[in-house]
Each structure stands twice: as structure tokens, then as C-alpha cells.
Image: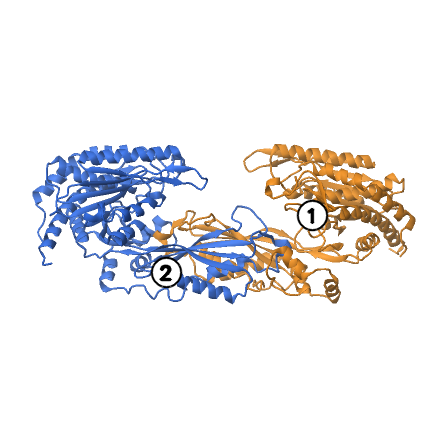
Chain colours: A orange, B blue
């Protein structure tokens, strides 16, 4: 495979290095907008709209054609409605011989307040020891800007952009991306019809070492309700003669896993893909210091003692977590109540080739068996309230090869090929609806603290990340050309 | 045993019947005071003080010497302080040859609002079909006034009161009677030194049939905390490699009982008193229609099918109830959290001759064994945060004989001898601190709805209850005299 011209790469790197303070300044302007989509209050919605306008202006400065697609309004439980920010669809270039790469990112952030334990004002990007602290710095404003920076470097140098670029930037990701899925379906044969590849940069590396993410687990979220009656009972007046719903529920929840974390639902492991030798090599090669990992997680001991087992149980085996109980006594202090109706909540992270409908059937059958063995006169009902498929890409996809080469060119080392134990539904939506290859190219380091206090992105990750995207464009053009040479 | 003079009894009954509308009017005035001690707000505290003053005035009208004992102030979690209503200590008569009977009652009520589902204004006593609806009507203003009515009948008829009467009326019962226990200890050799018997009328009959309560269960309330770390985890990022605290907790709570309600803590039944033949006869004689009971409780099936088993498991066997979990996800909706630190809450109702310190040791040993079998790296800690002894009186006590005869005289039938599955700590305090015989003489019917919406007392229960107390005074004098005739 031929490499992109070394001179051009050098020019791009130099440009990005020279303009890095401008790029940081731009990130500072974006972080200054409190585009919190989680708290449904009018002031924050206005901030979201302002953030959308800011991003649209940046894309227009690149020369992109920008379309703001109305997303309607959000209906709140109290009947109030709040406008949703429009979704940005933008495009730059439509040369038929070039591949079209579509970047998905989001402009909204999680809530943040100084009082939560931030050492700096969350909406004032503050650099300390090469770390840029601020809400949204890594999730997801920094990566969105890195992509824009990469495009702008080509434009500023008056170099031909080697790919056609499209953008999908939304403002409601932290609130569930409800409008996005509809839009993707609606625009399948419109905006997305010319898209060849989709790139998402909304996850993190596993360590300080660069990484590409090629899989995410899915999620089947269950509720199991046990009901005696709607009202609670007094434990003095009724304790001793009732089939107590909490006793039933605790037995049901206790039947789901053993103390080693293994899921006890019959058949649940039947569809889990067998471990391949290639996969084992990836785990062995992955950078993870267990001692550091334990310390940073503040966990005394994990269920497993080796790096390989830890990675496999996070990435390629299902896991079951019990989240809590609704309807029981959950406050501080004492209350002598027998809850009349309780709902347990748990979810199973799914891995290839598990399917939500199969898992749903298995879980329901299992819980019904356990419940019927108790001869309880209560009513039990189990629901799968969410069923998200796992997502996995082939590490041999053109996109992954291009991204690998881009990271090598910038960081001087091959990236770790990692998966992620959590779920990004939008990856699955793009893959399912559009049937396009999805690449997850994270820029943030493991300690960036997304969703947490003192979120940051390292200046290095942000600036080198901009270079990675620039080289990625060049590599994609090369691979795309090569692919077209192949016989159909 | 001789009976009280029939003529005097008739005069008393006639007086009470003739003045029943006055007695209902008095209850109406008392119910009109929103003496809610549960909600710590200044307005309601003023109402509590007004209620105390009203009761003190009623006692003074009887001719009693009334002492208002300052109870200090209540410290709220937010640092605010609120005055507590004083405790009323009152006495009427001090003839050394008469027995001294001390009545304990409370003037405060549970919160109530029309919006909670009351059909009438909770603070306007409203009569419908012989039922007097209003907050506090049965718990405990009606019974307190019935005792006062009984005394007032003797006074109005200018008849000698056959017993010395003392009153302990407090205003913080629904908020835990914190000041009362201290007062009882302080006044052990003062106000209480001349008291022979204590009467409480703060429970309910088991049906529409009159009853005397001779036992209450105690309560050992436990918390069991399982901690991995203080913060929660994301179930995507950590699910599969953690000893999850909820999994440990569910296993611990699930080890406490089997599906038949039997407590699985080793040794827990060792100290439970064996069932006597005399006891069995009491259960057999007790009025309880199981079908009606099930229907009124809105429960499809209890753990047991016979009246005797139901009564024994409510009254004379321990029971264990799981109340809930603090620290887990307890709200509506979905949250993919692995709670980092969770606290399960459960309590065991104790019966004679179980003792809280023994139960504490047994429960801790059991949970430690279950937890150690799991090889979890989490920390577990178990606390018994409350340990209240069971209380039981002998049904052959003079007080019970007198009360039985009084109920027979008024209702024409022997009362059921019942126990109560719940816990009235004050009974245990009087018995433990003062070593005096305690009688529980309930006046309210099973459907009075104490603590609930549409609380009521039947006019019949209130008026006939006033007669019961009047005859009880006469019977106590007879029995006391008889007892004094016995050789020492």
C-alpha cells in the first residue's frame, strides 16, 4: 500500500502545531457555552441553541453547506415543552471519485457546577500542566473541533481535501439522541445516500496509549415487579403472615448471578461468540496496568487477576448488574414498612452474537421458574424495557486500517485495538439503518473524566488528534482508490 | 368476688348516655386542633401547645392537680429548633387505702389532609351512620376523653371516685416519645412512686368485638451495609469485573428467610416460648373471620390458612421483614448504575423470651458466615440500630380481671384476649423502669383506620368505652381491697 506524500503530511503537521493556540482558543469559546441538555430548563436550552449556531458558523467558515434540521420540541413530564436544538447536517465536497466520510459528534454536555467538586470553573477552559480542564473538553467538543481543525488545515494550506466530508452534529446526545434516530431513518436515501463511512470520536483510550475502539456491548434492561397490593403494610401488623414482595424480589434478583459474577440464566452464554486466537493476541498486546487500574477505580480486588480476563469480561462476555429497587424504603433512617409493590431493576450487557429478543425470553423463563418455585401468592411481571444490540466492527475494515496508519504516523506507535463495555446506541443505529461501516476513533485518554468532575482533554491529545484526522483523510483516499481498483 | 353496687353502675351508665352529645362535642373540639407532631413546623407546634392547654384545662375542671413538665426543644437536622409540648402529669385523689391507677395517653396526631383521600375534613369531627370521622378520633383523643368522661361522671354524680387517678399525657408520641422515657426515669421515685397500675388505651380490637391486649412484639431493626467504594460505577465501564455490592446485598437479604416466611438465622427460634394449651384456647376463642380479614387487607392469600396459625404468626412467633435498600437506584426510569455502597434494612419482631442482644449476635454471625462464603472483596457491616423487647402481661393480673369484668358489664360478653404484632415501646418502658403492671385496654374497632385516611371512632365505642372505664374504676377498687385482705 502506498503512503500519503510525506511532504504534505509534514506541512499539515507544521500548520497544526503553529496554530495550536488558536485551536485551544476555539475550544475555550465552545466550552464557555453551558450547552447542558440534561437539565430541561429554558436558560440552558438557549445555551444549546447558541452552541448550535456557533458550530454552524464554524462549519460555514470551512466552506461547508450547512443545514439546520428542526428537531421539534421535548415534552416534559409536567406538560411543559422545551425546544430541541436543530441537528446540523453539513457537507463539504461532493467529488464522485473521492470517498465520503461522515463525522458524527455532539455539542451538548452533562451538567457541571463548581460546587460538585470542580477545582476550576467548568465553563472556563483552564490549562494546567498541559491539561485543558472544562466541561465538554473531551466529551465531545474537543474531538468535534479536532475534526474541524483537520479540515481547516487543508483549507488554509489550499490543499485539496482528499475526501468528501459530511457532518452530523446533534445537541441532545446526553439526553438520549431521540430525534437523531428518526432523522437517520428519514435521510437514509437523502443526506446519507452518498456516505461511505461513518466516524465517531466519542469514547476514550484504555490508557495513555492511543487506541481504536472496534466493539461496544449492547444492553438489555429489565424490570421485575412483585406486587401484593398497591399500598404498603405495617410490619408489626402484618409481619409473619404475608408473602412479602421484597422477600420474593430478593430471591429473584439473587438467582441471577453467582458470587463469581457468572450469570445463572440458562442458555445466556449459548450465543456468546467463541474467543479466537487473533482476539487473544489483541488482549495480550493491549496496554493495561492492573495495579494502576485498580487504584484509579478505587477497587480493592476485581473478580479476576489477569489483564486478559479483565478485558474479556469487560468487552466480550456479558455482565449482569442489579441497579436498585423502586417502591421499597430507600431513605436514611428506619421505617417499619412491608412494601406492597416493588420493582427490581437490572440489566445485561450483551456481546456478539447475543440478541435482545432471545435474552428477553431466557430471562423471563428463568425468573418465572424461580418465582413459581416459591409458591408466592403475589403477582410477578418481568419487562425488558430496553434492548440494544452489541456493536462490533472488523479490525480489518479499510477505515480501521486507515485510522491505524494515521495514529502510527502521529504517535509513532500502533494503537491498541480495544472494545468498550458500555453502549453507544448511535453506532448501532448507523450500522443497522444505513448499513455503513462505522469507525470509533477516540482521542481522549482514560483519565479524562467524562461525565465527572474536572473533565479535561490533554492539549497533546487535542492537537495530535487533529493531525490524526488530517492523516486519516489522506489514508482513506489512498485505500478508497485502491479498493476501487479491485474487480467488483 | 363481690360485684360493684348495681345501682351505682346504672346511675353512671345513665349519666353517660344522657350526656353523650356533650362528650362528642368535647371530642369535636379536640379533633379541631391540628396537633400534628410529625411535621416539624412552627404553626403545628403552636397547635400542639394549644392542644396541651386544652387537655390541662379539662383535667383542672375535674379537680385534678396539673403539672406541665417542660420537655425542652427538638433539634432538627437543619439546625433549627422547635419547642416540644410539655408533658402533662396530673393527679386526682391520694387516699392511701385506694389503688392508684395511672392513665397514659397522647394528644398528638399523625398528619392528615383532605387531599390525601379523606371524604370529610380531617379536623372537623363528622358523624356518619354512628361513626365519628376525624384525625385523632381513635388515636388517641377519643380514648383519652373516654377516661376523662368516666371520671367526670363520678364527679357530676357526686360519687366517691373509687380509685386515685393519675394522668400522663404527652404530645410527641407520633414523633417517638423521646422526652417521655427520660421523664419516667426521672419521676420513678416522684410522681410514679405511688402508682400501682398503668393503663394504656392506644391499640385496637381485632374485630368489632371488644378485646384486651396482653402482649406486643418487640423489634430489632438491622442495617447491613456492603461497600465497594463511596462512588457509584457505570455498569458499562465496570460491569463484569466487580464484586457488585448489590449482588452481595441481595444474597445476604435472601439468606434471611425461606419462601414460607421462616427465619433462617440459626438459633433464632431457640428462645421463643413454647405454645401452651391455655394459649391455644385463647386463639380458638378469638373472633376473626379469615375471609373478611383477607378482604380488608386486600391480600389474595396469607402464608397460613387457619385462624390459629395466622394469630400465632402475628403475635407469638417472630417475623422478619425486609424494608428496603438505601444507596441503590430507587427512582422511576432506567439508570445503568452499579451502586458503590448499599445498605439493606430489615427488622425482626421479637416475642417472649427473645432478647435483642441475643438476636443481634445471631443475626451478625449468620450474615458474616453468608458473606464470607461469597469471597467478596467488599466490606460488610451489620448494625442493630434499634432493639425493643417484647411486652407481655399475664391475663390473670388483677387489672385484666377488672377490665374483663368491666367490658362484660358494658358489652354483655367476655372480651377477646388478644396480642398485637407491633411494638408500643412505652408499655415496655413503664414495665421496665417502674416495674408496674401495665394494662392495654383498647376502645377502637379494627376498622378505625389509625394513621390512615378517614380515621374514625364509632360513637358506640367512645360512649360505651367511657362506661367501661367507669366500671373499671369500681372493679379495681374491689380487687384492690380484696388483695389487701390477703395475708402478706
In the rendered image, residue A192, in percent from the top left (x then y), is placed at 77, 43
Name the residue that disc number 2 marks: B357
Q: Is residue B270 above or below residue A80?
A: below
Q: Chain of mark 1?
A: A
> Please, what secondary structure does the residue beneath circle 2 have?
helix
Frontmost residue, B130 versus A306: A306
Residue B457, which numbered label?
A: none
x, y percent for residue B308: 29, 59
Residue B478 is left or right of residue B233, and the answer is left
Horizontal side of A380 relative to A174 (left or right) equals left
Which residue is label 1 attached to? A426
- Callout 1 crowding tier (Cα within 10 Å): few <14, some 14–19, many ≥20: some
Name the quadrant containing residue A69: top right
- Dot 1 falls on a residue whose secondary structure is helix
Asked whether B65 or A397 is in front, the reply is: B65
Tell if the residue under mark 2 belongs to the same chain as the one under mark 1: no
Q: Quadrant of residue A63?
A: top right
What's the residue at 63%, 55% (across, down)? A297
How packed mark 2 is, by other alpha carbons closer than 10 Å (few <14, some 14-19, many 20 or more), is few
Q: CA distance from mark 2 to mark 1?
A: 57 Å
Can residue B412 be seen here? The reply is no
Please name whichever residue, B1 or A247, is drawn nearer the observer in this view of the structure: B1
Query: Is B229 above or below relative to B28?
Result: below
Q: Residue A403: x percent and y percent?
A: 80, 53
Q: Position of residue B318 (x, y in %)?
A: 35, 59
Residue at x 39% of width, y 38% of height: B39
Amino acid at each position: 500500500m502506498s503512503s500519503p506524500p510525506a511532504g504534505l503530511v509534514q506541512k499539515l503537521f507544521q500548520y497544526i502545531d503553529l496554530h495550536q493556540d488558536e485551536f485551544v482558543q476555539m475550544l475555550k469559546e465552545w466550552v464557555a457555552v453551558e450547552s447542558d441538555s440534561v437539565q430541561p430548563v429554558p436558560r440552558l436550552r438557549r445555551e444549546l441553541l447558541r452552541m448550535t449556531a456557533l458550530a454552524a458558523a464554524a462549519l460555514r467558515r470551512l466552506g461547508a453547506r450547512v443545514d439546520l434540521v428542526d428537531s421539534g420540541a421535548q415534552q416534559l413530564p409536567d406538560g411543559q415543552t422545551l425546544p430541541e436544538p436543530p441537528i446540523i447536517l453539513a457537507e463539504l465536497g461532493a467529488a464522485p471519485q473521492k470517498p465520503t466520510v461522515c463525522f458524527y459528534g455532539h455539542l451538548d454536555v452533562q451538567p457541571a457546577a463548581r460546587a460538585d467538586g470542580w477545582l476550576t470553573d467548568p465553563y472556563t477552559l483552564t490549562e494546567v500542566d498541559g491539561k485543558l480542564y472544562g466541561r465538554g473538553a473531551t466529551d465531545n467538543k474537543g474531538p468535534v473541533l479536532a475534526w474541524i481543525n483537520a479540515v481547516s488545515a487543508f483549507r488554509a494550506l489550499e490543499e485539496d481535501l482528499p475526501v468528501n466530508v459530511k457532518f452530523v452534529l446533534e445537541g441532545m446526545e446526553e439526553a438520549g439522541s431521540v430525534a437523531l434516530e428518526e432523522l437517520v431513518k428519514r435521510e437514509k436515501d437523502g443526506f446519507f445516500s452518498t456516505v461511505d463511512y461513518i466516524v465517531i470520536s466519542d469514547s476514550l483510550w484504555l490508557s495513555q496509549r492511543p487506541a481504536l475502539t472496534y466493539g461496544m456491548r449492547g444492553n438489555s434492561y429489565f424490570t421485575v415487579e412483585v406486587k401484593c397490593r398497591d399500598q404498603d403494610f405495617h410490619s408489626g401488623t402484618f409481619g409473619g403472615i404475608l408473602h412479602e414482595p421484597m422477600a420474593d424480589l430478593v430471591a429473584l434478583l439473587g438467582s441471577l448471578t453467582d458470587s463469581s459474577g457468572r450469570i445463572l440464566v440458562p442458555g445466556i452464554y449459548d450465543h456468546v461468540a467463541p474467543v479466537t486466537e487473533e482476539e487473544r493476541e489483541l488482549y495480550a498486546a493491549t496496554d493495561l496496568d492492573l495495579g494502576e487500574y485498580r487504584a484509579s477505580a478505587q477497587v480493592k480486588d476485581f473478580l479476576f487477576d489477569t489483564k486478559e480476563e479483565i478485558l474479556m469480561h469487560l468487552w466480550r462476555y456479558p455482565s449482569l448488574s442489579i441497579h436498585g429497587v423502586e417502591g421499597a424504603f430507600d431513605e436514611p433512617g428506619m421505617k417499619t414498612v412491608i412494601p406492597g409493590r416493588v420493582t427490581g431493576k437490572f440489566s445485561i450487557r450483551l456481546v456478539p452474537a447475543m440478541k435482545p429478543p432471545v435474552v428477553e425470553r431466557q430471562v423471563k423463563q428463568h425468573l418465572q421458574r424461580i418465582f413459581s418455585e416459591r409458591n408466592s401468592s403475589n403477582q410477578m411481571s418481568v419487562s425488558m424495557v430496553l434492548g440494544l444490540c452489541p456493536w462490533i466492527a472488523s479490525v480489518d475494515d479499510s477505515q480501521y486500517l486507515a485510522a491505524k496508519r494515521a495514529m502510527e504516523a502521529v504517535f509513532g506507535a500502533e494503537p491498541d485495538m480495544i472494545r468498550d463495555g458500555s453502549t453507544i446506541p448511535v453506532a448501532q443505529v448507523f450500522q443497522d439503518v444505513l448499513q455503513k461501516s462505522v469507525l470509533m476513533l477516540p482521542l481522549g485518554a482514560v483519565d479524562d473524566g467524562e461525565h465527572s468532575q474536572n473533565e479535561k482533554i490533554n492539549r497533546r491529545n487535542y492537537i495530535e488528534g487533529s493531525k490524526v484526522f488530517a492523516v486519516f483523510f489522506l489514508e482513506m483516499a489512498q485505500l478508497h482508490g485502491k479498493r476501487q481498483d479491485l474487480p467488483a
